[in-house]
Image (tube, grey):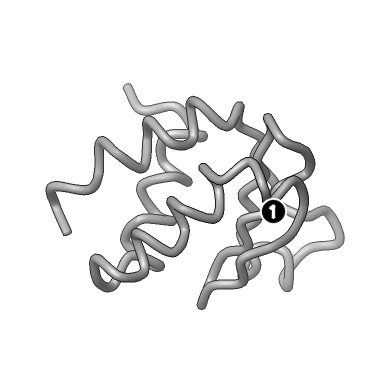
Amino acid sequence: MMSKDEGIFDKFIRDEMMDIETFHLIYDFVALDNFRQGEYEGNMFVVRKINANHIQLEDEVATENTSIPAVYTYAKKKFLSLLQSHKPSL
């Protein structure tokens, strides 16, 4: 059975990864240590670096419809691993 975190990551991949260039932009933003904080705003999701080792994935659509944001936190290494596992399908 798929966890909610896995489901939201799959939704993130379907909604945001339109091409390999977008994949590389997001991957590089997360991977580079020179960017310790910041946001990548996609069509449906925001990828937020909260520090050098933690990433938040916020479902903007879900946030618009509720007062409680749908935010998922990942270790940077885990987030990059999940991204990498979806790269061949692009």
In the structure shown, which secondary structural element does the residue marked by tag 1 occupy? strand
Residue ID at (38%, 67%) = 15
Q: Residue furthest left?
A: 88
Q: Position of residue 19 (x, y in %)?
A: 24, 71
Q: Position of residue 73 (x, y in %)?
A: 67, 35
Q: Is residue 81 above or below residue 45?
A: above
Q: Quadrant of residue 90?
A: bottom left
Image side of residue 11 versus residue 74, left or right: left
Image side of residue 48 versus residue 80, left or right: right
Assess disc 1: are there few (<14), some (14-19) or many (≥20) residues with their C-alpha within 10 Å of its C-alpha.
many
Residue ID at (57%, 64%) = 45
Q: Residue furthest bottom?
A: 43
Pick the front one: 53 or 11: 53
Pick the front one: 63 or 19: 19
Which residue position is annotated with label 1?
A: 48
Q: Is residue 1 above or below residue 57?
A: above
Residue ID at (48%, 26%) = 78
Q: Is residue 2 above or below residue 43?
A: above
Q: Amino acid at mark 1?
A: Arg
Pick the front one: 85 or 29: 29
Q: Residue furthest top?
A: 1
Residue ID at (86%, 61%) = 67
Q: Residue furthest front?
A: 34
Quadrant into which the N terminus falls:
top left
Q: How many discs appear? A: 1
Q: Is residue 7 above or below residue 28?
A: above
Image side of residue 79 versus residue 38, left or right: left
